Image (tube, rainbow, N blue to C red):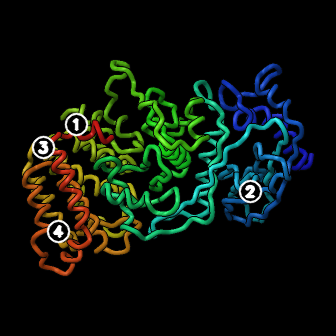
Amino acid sequence: MDPLRKCVAILVGVGLATTVSAAALGQTEGSPGQMALPGDQAASTEAAISETTVTARGHQVAAGGSAGNLEGASCPTDFKMLSGSCHPGYTNQVRIINQYPNIALNAWRCGFKNNTSSNRSVWVYTLCGKGGLPDIVEHRLQIRRFTTTTLTNADADRILGDATTTMQTNDGPGDVACGVSMVRDGNVATFSTGDGSIDSSAEFSTLIGLPGWIKAVNQINWCGGLIPNVIGCAPVPGSSLAVVRFQASLEGILWAHEFGHNKGLSHRNDDPNAIMNGTISSSRLRMTQAECDAFRTAPLIALASQEVMPAAGESSLMPVEDFVRQIFIHGVPYDQASQYGPDAVPKLLEMLNDPAEEAWWPNIVVVLGMIGDPSVVDPMISFIEEEMDGELSREHYIAKTSALMSLGYVVNKTGNQKALDYLKASINPTTWQDKDVGQAPFQASTTERSIDFSKHAILGLALSGHPEAEQALRSLQQAPADTELGRAFQAQVDELVSEALDEHRRIAREGLDEYYETTQ
């Protein structure tokens, strides 16, 4: 059987009974990949399609080469893409490395890796349908990135395609196949406003006010309040959102989650598999019909539903190593992290010294700070000061800067003088100039790194709520610095310091428990 005929048989015989019913035709319940049997809703819905067709496009992949975004042929006029298939040329040495729908082109998209020693032909097929298809609400979104944030058109298309697939697929009980798509509107543009790090209410408001819907930045430390290591933040409701780049396989879920906030949705933590859960993983795929309705509309006011949390007594405190190995979209939740006591510190410090746990170092240092035991001060400072020539991984950099902020938690809870003095000294960027603590992939120089470290020390002082911290912050506004770098830094952080003082006063007045009760 030739490749086209074989692919048609596969797509019509299997894909239409599974992929189409789950992704586009409103299958009710059942595990992903379950083949529809006579009498199933999927089968009866399939019959409503009046016509199907398969398009095909061949490509060459060079020996030993990769091709990440090879397009299939678009569906004919009046047909909609249902699903697709990648054909690696009848050899297990040509691997499929990615595949996802390209909603904008109404075609399937595939990636291949050719591990053979000769050029290979590969095929991309798109299954198209006419009639009986649900109405798809298409959201065309302008996307912008900070100048030093990496995000290409192909990246954006992949992420939006993943988000669309997540929303259009029925992933089992408690989920609906939602007729909505997210599509890139124009090329990914750049902006240079700010420094690529969102550290205050004013910076977040400025970012949200820029043209475009999705804004990609390097770091977020403010989302309703000061909190380290946020990966996404959006007004509820709103027409713009902020994200950072992170694990490619999960970015589609993140963008869908933040877009849900823009549509008026709050967190739904009673379902560990909900898109709107406060943590993110490959299983956070499900939405209710009410959430689908929100994704399909553009509400002008927030929905009446409130954030749903697990009922009291339903869950016990999980082992601390499992807790920090979660991806928290809006930062580590203070109310949960602060329940751990000093007995959790040795395990967390062990993980902080283990390179295999590097992906979780940002969470680890934040939880160590939120526990607030004085024994963490020396290890945290050593972690920040560890010499690392050259470029740090993003996770390592976020962990070092989050550790600076987290020392503020320790000062808040214990009044530890060593941590306080360290933060006070660290707000002077010249302190960092001669230290080989490494720099982030998005930083062009050690000077830029030094300024960023000092900014995080300012945020740490704000979190401390300590009287001496207020004095140190005010000194940045009052006494002129004695170096050119210091004077430039003072001018750059004037607004940040003002906001840090506001947050400091609020934390000193309310305490961290009440502060995070209203901000997280």
Counting residues from the start of the chain, the first of labels 1 and 2 encountered is 2
Image label count: 4
How many other residues sit within 10 Å of disc 4, few (<14), some (14-19) or many (≥20)? many
Which of marks 3 and 4 precedes in the sequence?
A: 3
As shown in the figure, which amino acid type bears the numbered disc 3?
Answer: Pro
Pointer 4 or 2: first along the chain: 2
In this picture, residue 138 sits left or right of residue 347: right
- Note whether residue 508 is visible: yes
Q: Secondary structure at mark 3?
A: helix
Q: Horizontally, is 424 left or right of 157 in the view?
A: left
Contact, CB < 8 Å: mark 4 with mark 3? no
Instruction: Give the labeled residue for mark 3.
Output: 374
Residue type for callout 1: Glu
Where is residue 389? Give x, y as percent: 31, 69
Earlier in the chain: of badge 2 and badge 3, it is 2
Residue visible at 19% across and 77% down in the picture: 487
Q: State the CA–CA distance, disc 4 to disc 2.
A: 52 Å
To which residue does mark 1 refer?
Answer: 514
Kindly identify the amino acid type of the residue bearing the numbered disc 2.
Leu
Mark 1 or mark 4, which is nearer to you?
1
Q: Residues within 10 Å of mark 2 (few under 14, many from 20)?
A: some
**Gap between marks 4 and 3, in whole Å?**
24 Å
